Amino acid sequence: MSAPLIIGSVAYSPNVVPIWEGMRDYFAETSTPIDFMLFSNYASLVDSLITGTIDLAWNTNLAWVRTVAQTDGACRALASRDTDLVFQTVFVARAGSGFTGLESLRGRRLALGSRDSAQAAILPVHFLREAGIGETDVDLTRINSDVGKHGDTGRSELDALRAVLEDRADAAAIGINTWQAIGRGELLPGAFESFWISPEYSHCTFTAMPSLTIDRSDEWVANLFAMDWENLEHQRILEMEGLRAWVSPKLDGYASLIAAVREQKVSDRW
Amino acid sequence: MVTASPPVGAGLLLDLVENVSRVATGRTASVDFGTCDREAALELISAWCLSSGNEIVSMVGSAITVLHGRSPDPLAGLDPGQLPGSRVWVYTNFDCNLACDYCCVRSSPKAERRAIGMDRVRQIAHEAADADVKELILTGGEPFLLNDLDELVNACTNKLPTTLLTNGMLFHGRRRERLRRMDRSQLVLQISLDSATSEIHDSHRGSGSWARAVAGIQIAHDEGFRVKVAATLPADQMHELAPFHAFLDTLGILRDDQVIRALAHRGVAESGIELTVDSLIPEVTITADGVYWHPVAADHDDQFVTENIFPLADAIAEVTRRFIAHRRSANAISEWFPCA
Ligand code: SF4
């Protein structure tokens, strides 16, 4: 049997250990066993992928884009969650505050999440720019609660929503996952409402370097795709990681973030 | 002066989402709704739990504790025979010809009879069969003190396999006639015998009782009944069982029918293992006074469940509901003492 593939992941939640132990146990029964290494931030994860310390990185969309930039496109995206292909950013305000679209944000206060969060900081600015609204047209409040984790913890987005509640901001930009986590405004009608939802874009993806042969990565991906929601042991892991099925990545879903990173001159090292 | 509670705010929701996300699935997190309206807070958190796949586990004061994720089925892992209601115990009466020093329900010749009576036994048997109960177990007191025991037993065996617990000492005269009228194909007799020789048994159950119990086993066999023997032993004697099993072999008791149970600290017993609702898997038990958690505590208020025996399915459901609640809170408690 071949040596286990080493997969790197950022420890963004207390569930990361049970998720990866579950994944390791699952892959132990396949032709492509794995082990895992946890990192405290995506910069270190990407560095370790490029230097060969790990074989695969479980990257956010920003980490994928940075890996592409740092490897001149030599890296490969192997697989994503079904939920990663339909990620969106949601602009939210207090219910009844009269926002009708991005245009209503001119001259108003917008709370953004961590500066390294694609969904809650980088892409919102990009979507505003696409709508003809520059950074100086809106009063931006950046809430850098969990820098290094690319917004994975969701904490900065909750803090952005708190800023709206406490009247430190008029609106907030958050990921669709956080919007869903607070019940999409339906649990407490009268608290929050969304006034603009972005086009879908791609989020996380397993990333490999060319040193991992295509045969080996194909075999690993086939085993990954064989995880089955109907299997309760698989379901336990999939549910914690927030997906129902592993799928092939959608590379054109990263175009908006690639453009945003270029426009905003986002650092290579995040 | 009436002070209105402030309305529940979205801040509570944000705290809830954040606190739960900070703990791993299977762990709990709490939020405090402070002086906000209690009902509204509970409603909001319940709705959030429902939509997000989490679960409220407790509410103490203004703190609500939520489990991250859904708790596993609390009944999973139990043997089907351990599911509440898979068998139902019925105390036919509480009086007894003996006054054993460890009797868990304080039976004796002086104990009040508190008979369950024919009508209720018939209804229990009827409803038990419909409620997917697999077996009825009749106990006392000493059931053979009852003049209508044969009818009671037949009402049960007409519906379900039945076990009748007895001290085996009264199989004479009209009582033996009643024994003869019972259905051998559906009834097992379980006779109490604590030791291979008379000393230990008689020291707890009364002089001469061992010899009469052994004779009773013989009579039951002669009458064609399958006999189980149940011994009640202090925990410190549980390791010296080989001679006892060898003796029961000579009486023709199958090994599977040799039941050894530890003495419980209940009733008139001065020592024994402590059995509480938290530590006991329930065995639905019916007495003339109502439904109890377990036969070992059928005379103790701490394990009283309800005075409503009927509908029996509801009584079983209530025991099951409490059992699930106990197991959930036990899981929550164990989380607070992870090294224990
Ligand atoms: S243990 Fe059984 S035989 Fe002894 S007093 Fe109690 S009911 Fe009667």
Image: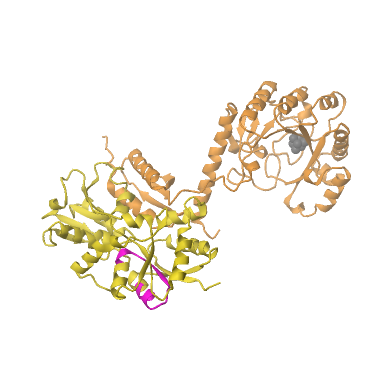
Q: Is residue A210 visible?
A: yes
Place of residue B199 in the rendered image (x, y in percent of width and height, measured from the top left) = 85, 46
Q: Colour of chain B?
A: orange
- x 51%, y 61%: residue: A26
Camera-side residue: B198 or A26? A26
Please state, as top left, top right, bottom left or bottom right, where the C terminus of chain A lies in the image: bottom left
Camera-side residue: A146 or B94? A146
Q: Colour of chain A?
A: yellow
- The part of the chain drawn in magenta is A46-62
Is B113 colored magenta in this rendering? Answer: no
Count of marks placed on residues: 0
**Relative to B108, is A155 above or below?**
below
Place of residue A156 in the rendered image (x, y in percent of width and height, measured from the top left) = 28, 59
Ligand 1, by image quadrant, is top right
- x 88%, y 39%: residue: B211
- x 14%, y 62%: residue: A135
Colour setting: by chain
- x 24%, y 66%: residue: A258
| Quarter of the view holding residue A118 | bottom left
Residue farthest front in this picture: A215
Residue farthest bottom in this picture: A51
Place of residue B31 in the rendered image (x, y in percent of width and height, measured from the top left) = 36, 50
| Quarter of the view holding residue B213 | top right
Place of residue B109 in the rendered image (x, y in percent of width and height, measured from the top left) = 77, 30
**Relative to B286, is B75 above or below?**
below
